[in-house]
Image (cartoon, rainbow, N blue to C red):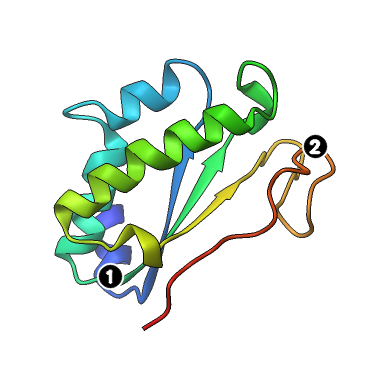
Amino acid sequence: KNMITGTSQADCAVLIVAAGTGEFEAGISKNGQTREHALLAFTLGVKQLIVGVNKMDSSEPPYSEARYEEIKKEVSSYIKKIGYNPAAVAFVPISGWHGDNMLEPSTNMPWFKGWKIERK
């Protein structure tokens, strides 16, 4: 209910997905919350989407570029099916717990050079 109320007035949505083993897979599964929230945002008219790949410190190994790329690929595939253009969506690997890439670039993820998005 709260998700719908807030989203119906939003210009942009930030979709947070967990990078932890099993957590991401649960969220992106057929009835997962990641899918549900992305679909709700699109259905309610939110045109701009940012995806935060959280808990990068919990990936195996920690701060894994391969895990980030795997999640980015899976999420891109799903959001494309519901109507978003993945090239126009910013993806950012983060760790909310440690503050990585929250306010400034993280030394734990030197491979991340910033998001690359297509503008209209």
Q: Is residue 120 left or right of residue 109?
A: left
Q: Left or right: 44 with respect to 94? A: left
Residue 86 x, y percent position in the rendering: 34, 58
Label 1: few (<14), some (14–19) or many (≥20) C-alpha neighbours in 10 Å: some
Determine whether 110 is above or below 104 in the image. above
Q: Residue at x 71, y 36 (%)?
A: 97
Q: Position of residue 105 (x, y in %)?
A: 78, 54
Q: Where 113 falls versus 109 (above or below)?
A: below
Circles 1, 2 touching at the beta carbon (< 8 Å): no
Q: Can you identify the residue that label 2 sits on?
A: 108
Question: Which residue, given by chain and number where applicable, does mark 1 sit on?
Answer: 46
Residue 104 falls in image quadrant: bottom right
Density class for disc 2 (Cα within 10 Å; few <14, some 14-19, many ≥20) is some
Residue 8: % across, % down: 24, 70
| Residue 53 image offset from top left, x and y in percent | 53, 41
In the rendered structure, the answer to whether residue 90 lies left or right of residue 85 reads right
Q: Kindly identify which numbered label has been placed on residue 98.
A: none
Give the quadrant of residue 47: bottom left
Q: Earlier in the sequence, mark 1 or mark 2?
A: 1
The residue closer to the viewer here, 18 or 110, is 110
Task: Look at the numbered disc 2 and give the secondary structure of its residue.
Answer: loop
Measure the alpha-carbon separation of dots 1 and 2.
32 Å
Q: Give the residue type at disc 2.
A: Asn
